[in-house]
Amino acid sequence: MRICLITPVALLLAGIGATAAVAADTRRDCQSWASASGPAKAAIANRIGSEHLLTKAHKLAEATPGASESLYRSSDIQRLCRSY
């Protein structure tokens, strides 16, 4: 019976740790995005947008290597990064 009680607690703690790791990665990505320019800024914005399931500016747009435009609206990226 003890194993059944410990397992949900362990899963909850593992989930909290994973959430903190994602928040740290997003904070780092947001800081990088704010200081980047050109294709680097677009690449970071595309990564942030896809990781956080943001709405694309054009529904079926796909990223191409070396693209200088983000698939996601900068206002959405700014709103997300404001909380970090």
Image (cartoon, rainbow, N blue to C red):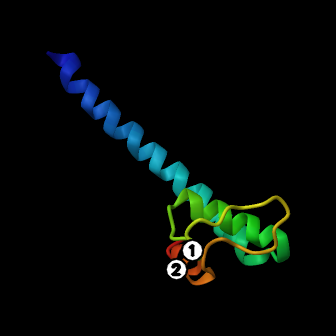
**Which residue appears at 51% of the width and 61% of the height?**
52
**Rendered position, 6 above or below 46:** above
> For mark 1, what is the residue?
81
**C-beta proximity under 8 Å, tags 1 and 2:** yes
Task: Say which amino acid is labelled 1.
Answer: Cys
- Could you tell me which secondary element the residue under label 1 belongs to? helix
Q: Position of residue 59 (x, y in %)?
A: 55, 69
> For mark 2, what is the residue?
79
- Could you tell me which secondary element the residue under label 2 belongs to? helix
How many circles with numbers are drawn on the protein?
A: 2
**Which residue appears at 56% of the width and 57% of the height?**
51
Query: In what quadrant of the picture does the C terminus appear?
Result: bottom right
- Quick check: 54 left or right of 72? left
Q: Position of residue 34 (x, y in %)?
A: 71, 77
Q: 41 and 5: which one is in front?
A: 41
Task: Say which amino acid is labelled 2.
Answer: Arg
Q: Residues within 10 Å of mark 2 (few under 14, many from 20)?
A: few
